[in-house]
Amino acid sequence: MGPLVPEFINNELNLVFAVLIGIAFGFILESAGFSSSKKLAGVFYGYDFTVLRVFFTAGVTAMVGVLVLSHNGLLDLELIYVNPLFLWSAIVGGLIMGLGFVIGGYCPGTSMCAIMIGKIDAMVFVLGAMLGIWGFIEGYPIFEGLYTGYDFGIPQVSQTLNMPLGLFAFLMIVVAFGSYWLVGIIEKKATKNVVVDTTSKRSMIVITVVALIIGLVASTLKPEKAMILDKINDSAYTSSFEINTISSDELALRFIYKDKSLQVIDIRNSKDFQTMTLPSATNLSLNDFFTKSSKNIFNLEDKVNIIVGDNDVNSKKGYILAKELGFENVLQLKGGFNQFKSDIIDFKSSSTMEANLTDTQRFRREASSIVPVLIEKSKPKVIEKQKVRALGGCG
Amino acid sequence: MKPNKYMNPYLAGLLLGLLLVVTIYITGHGLGASGAAKSVVIYSLESIAPAHSENVPYLQDFNATHEGSPLKTWLVFEILGALLGAFISGVLANRLKFTVEHHSGITSKTRLVAALIGGALFGFGAQLGRGCTSGAALSGMAVFSTGGILTMIAIFGGGYLFAYFFRKLWIN
């Protein structure tokens, strides 16, 4: 599963990819005409909207691509770099960049490409950019408040607009293609009928239709993780799922016999876990199930994994998720932790007359004095979360 | 020989978008540009004025969180590749020529002064905005980042907001 760095590609090899990716990047920018400031600035004066066409098409393509990869489980969205949101520094920084764009006619990437085909104004632009960066570095204490203030973490539009990623991608495609048709008209007026975009009307119709169809498909896509979580929350799906269970009594018996193959996976919240859990339990949230370290825990040889939630419904969800993720040797504790606690730990015999007790009740009475001692002896294991997001951005 | 035509913009956008997806799949992050310029600035400062650099708070923070030479970063290598790629494209399309490109209504000198000022503003803004058109706007959009998309809106919104005042640089 992607990203391939750092697990499958080491840092040295990554730098080789950096050069190769860079070559393609520079080639595309130059070929599209981004080595010309006149062409770039046209987007702000209506005579050449190439920037908008290239930029928007690249943006929606990448959005759909990222969705497709995560939908198929090829890319873990929780590991990729998401640009953080520092509200005012994003807005003020962006506005200053916009001002620099209309005055200087380039942005950093395009100016570097323009240098390579001999644009002297681009060389001066890059020199200016370095001076601007130097100014920021030297004056950092002045701007630090603005730079680090209004920190909203790393939200995605799905959280900010409360909208599925697929729907957002679809809307962006609609906006993009709507704007292509609109700017074509503006361009014609501004240039007095000089054709900037030579794409024929017929091809334009074809691309628009294809893009909208792709967008409609994309709007149904969800990261694989979200789909699996949807599934385990769907009662129609879970009620028909075949579940292998273990009862509180059997589990207690196996604790008493010190069954080494037992591995309790406690999926309750960490606060409840700290307060009291079962012997040899490991605390994993359903979210944690998706990590590689969880996979290693579940797939330990000669272990039987007992899924323990608060109650039967939660435990069942945990069981189904484990099965969906392909984990072997899983059992669900019937009734979850609550039932185990009332059956065994807090067992109160209803009758004091020995003869009136059933075998089960005798066993539970016995177990209720042994199991708490075992719980006391075994220390809960807290698993270190191994997920580390990629670093990125170019501030 | 006349320079060749530019690539169809939708095709260029499609290719750029696919490249971005590949980049995210391989590295976990997107494309960038201004970050490479920052690395060069930091390297230059530390080489030219080492004593001064030691007293600059920003660089103290930077060195505490970054190991090795500031030049040995992914973005520096990516931009080295980009320079090569742009050069190849320029050669193939017959576009290599030393020139100051400017609107006929202004002189070369005016254009160069504007490029210097514009560059300085862009470089400064890219620090505040944590990335430029590539690293914040485009790559941010690809990963549905609210911060990146907001920066994108601010860049282009800012461009349209200020365009009127600098129209003499570009149009009659």
Image: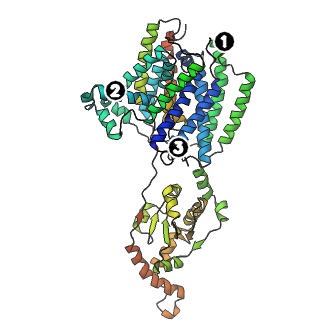
Q: Chain of mark 1?
A: A
Give amino acid for label 3.
Answer: Gln
Quote the CA–CA distance across marks 2 and 3: 41 Å
Placement of the C terminus of chain B among the 4 image quadrants: top right
Mark in front: 2 vs 1:
2
Kind of element beneath mark 2 = helix
**Real-space CA distance between mark 1 and mark 3, rounded to the nearest whole angstrom:** 44 Å
SS at mark 1? loop
* The residue positioned farthest toward the right in the image shown: A202
Are tags 2 and 1 found on a single chain?
no
Q: Are marks 2 and 3 in contact (CB under 8 Å)?
A: no
Indicate how the structure is coloured in the image: rainbow
Task: Return the residue found at the far bottom.
Answer: A355
Q: Position of residue A169 (x, y in %)?
A: 61, 38
- Name the residue carrying label 3: A159
Read off the residue under disc 2.
B44
Residue A262 in the image: x percent, y percent?
49, 72
Q: Are marks 1 and 3 in contact (CB under 8 Å)?
A: no
Query: Which residue lies at the image location 47% right of the left edge and 5% below the top edge?
Result: B107
Q: Mark 1 = which residue?
A: A194
